[in-house]
Amino acid sequence: MRPRLFLGVVSMTARTRMSYRVDFWITTLVSFVVDLAVAYYLWLAIFSASGATEIGGFSLAGMTGYYVLVILLGKLVRGDDMSMAISRDIYEGDLNKYLLYPVSYRVYKYAEHLGGVVPAILQVMLFGVGMALLFDLPTGLTITPVSVLMATVSVAVANL
């Protein structure tokens, strides 16, 4: 598949996912606030029950921030359920039409998968900055360009 076509499929899928902008952002915001509230109150109860100010080197704010970061990065790693989309294509008979296209089915489906991940990238960037502003970073944690690059490569490989 040519890169221009690949990027076209990614772009089309991303625009389709975000076509109902208000619904997309309300759903995104509500799920993020719920995840944040659950993480905060869960760790608040754990810290209160133990009487500790730090658990494993993390304060309450650091632990909550870490938990929400895991949720956000999990969206990037998992993306859409590509195996379910493939099985749906087989079950509904749509696989036949893809076999007639002059492109590889797997590459086309992966391009659609990446298009579904683009909104999650926007969410991670927006909410990640918000999290960094709201919560303190754990002591001893430093964010460098090298660590950001290594995390980006790790997430990209995990998504693949």
Image: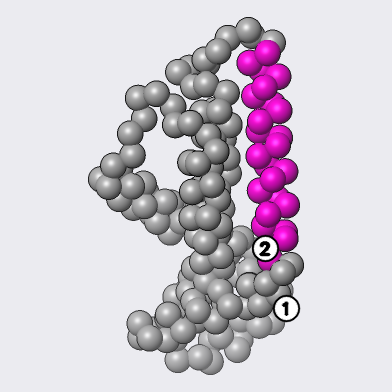
- Residue 38 against residue 91 in the figure, above or below: above
Q: Residue at x 71, y 35 (%)?
A: 38
* Residue 31: in magenta span: yes
Q: What element carries label 2?
A: helix
Question: Within 10 Å of the Cα at label 1, are there few (<14), some (14-19), or many (20+) other Cα atoms?
Answer: few
Colouring scheme applied when the structure was drawn: one colour
Please give the residue where the numbered disc 2 appears in the rendered image: 25
Q: Which residue is drawn at 63% across and 16% down?
A: 47
Question: Within 10 Å of the Cα at label 2, are there few (<14), some (14-19), or many (20+) other Cα atoms?
Answer: some
Q: Earlier in the sequence, mark 1 or mark 2?
A: 2
Report the quarter where the N terminus lies: bottom left
Q: What stretch is highlighted in magenta?
A: 24-48
Tell me where residue 84 appears, x and y as whole percent: 65, 64
Q: Is mark 1 on a helix, strand or loop?
A: helix
**Is residue 94 something that shows in the picture?**
yes
Q: Which residue is drawn at 28% across and 42% down?
A: 144
- Residue 77 against residue 40 in the figure, above or below: below
* Residue 124: in magenta span: no
- Residue in the foreground of this view, choosing between 63 and 5: 63
Q: Which SS type dominates the magenta stretch?
A: helix
Q: Which residue is drawn at 68% across and 54% down?
A: 29
Report the quarter where the C terminus lies: bottom left
- Residue 79 against residue 31 in the figure, above or below: below
- Residue 138 against residue 160 in the figure, above or below: above
Please give the residue where the numbered disc 1 appears in the rendered image: 92
- Residue in the foreground of this view, choosing between 106 and 142: 142
Q: Quadrant of residue 60?
A: top right
